[in-house]
Amino acid sequence: MSTLFVEHLTVIDCAYLDAARGLVGQSWIVDVELEGDLDQQSMVLDFGEVKRRLKRAIDSGLDHTLIVPTQAPELSLAHTGDISELQFRSALGAYEHRSPALAITPVDAAAIDEAAVTAHLRTSLAPILPANVARLDLRLRTEVIDGASYQYVHGLKKHAGQCQRIAHGHRSRIEMRVDGTRDAALEQDIALAWADIYLGTREDLITRANGELRFAYSAPEGRFELALPEAHAELLDADTTVERIAEHLAWVGAARLPGKTVEARAYEGVMKGAVGRVRGS
């Protein structure tokens, strides 16, 4: 048998529920290996087919969804038609989510981690492999980041070309420059403030009471609602695209540093992002 490998086949940008951390944004890089007999073209599988079959299945499955550990004792999950509703009791407080079922990925595990997601992927991808492939090996890994990073979840109801899901999450690096010089202390302050944060658009906030925020909006796929502890959310005045996030972070830095030009290089997951620049008054 021969082995074919593809490193960095795709990136799963997602959110998941965690008993200790609450709602967590994540970006997992996916590497794959396929072991099998060579076909009539002397290949285990053409690289184009690897992308067409495996990458497409991953991108249309786990990516941009809320991954839910169905065996977690903290979880209550119900489906009514094509609508999913859940409650989750974390150490940080209670979370509620209601959305079209396509926004949820149930995983048969007590907790979400690389091993649980890998096992789920291996099972879901097996039926689309050709008969000559005897083994599929997957590796989920996070980007190596030298410096500050934060993990966040946000909704993107107006993001053209993507499914409008409220559980769009990332693990992202952040770089801040003040008058052109990298400011590691400012980066760490932002990373600490935005550790496991939900970034909500102010216009989507429908209630604010008893330490809880509730967001809702309608998209072509249906209505999305999320309630979570206020201490673990931040409101932005605009849609939470990476361009707006970079702009917001630049304003945060400029407010602390009058007369300085602050540049925020905000990543959205792995190897992509936006730059915001503001001069403090």
Image (cartoon, rainbow, N blue to C red):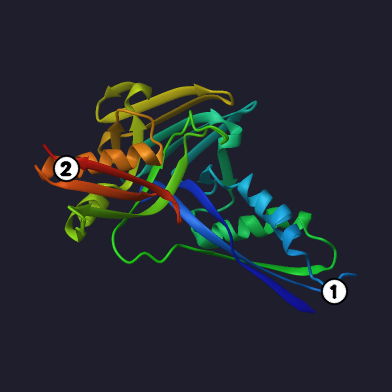
Q: Nearer the viewer, residue 188 or 280?
A: 280
Instruction: Note whether residue 85 is visible.
Output: yes
Left-right relation of 57 to 232? right
The residue labelled by disc 2 is: 254
Q: What residue type is labelled 1?
A: Ser
Q: Nearer the viewer, residue 51 or 103?
A: 51
For the point 57% across and 34% down, which residue is it? 163
- Is 85 placed above or below 256 here? above
Instruction: Name which quarter of the figure residue 61 lies in.
Output: top right
Q: Residue furthest right?
A: 40
Answer few, some or many: residues within 10 Å of disc 2's Cα (few below 14, many 20 plus, some between 14 and 19).
many
Instruction: List x then y, in percent, for residue 220.
Output: 58, 23
Mark carried by residue 79: none
Question: What is the C-alpha distance between the residues marked 2 and 1?
Answer: 59 Å
Residue 262, position in %: x, y?
Answer: 20, 47
Q: Residue at x 40, y 66 (%)?
A: 144
Q: In which quarter of the image is the C terminus?
A: top left
Q: In which quarter of the image is residue 217?
A: top left
Secondary structure beneath dot 1 equals loop
The local secondary structure at tag 2 comes to helix
Residue holding disc 1: 42
Residue type pointed to by label 2: Ala
Q: Position of residue 143 (x, y in %)?
A: 44, 63
Q: Residue 126: percent from the left, percent from the top?
A: 74, 58
Residue found farthest to the bottom = 1
Residue at x 21%, y 39% (from the top left corner):
251
The residue nearer to you, when weighing 252 against 127, is 252
Q: Is residue 123 left or right of residue 30?
A: right
For marks 2 and 1, the one nearer the N-term is 1
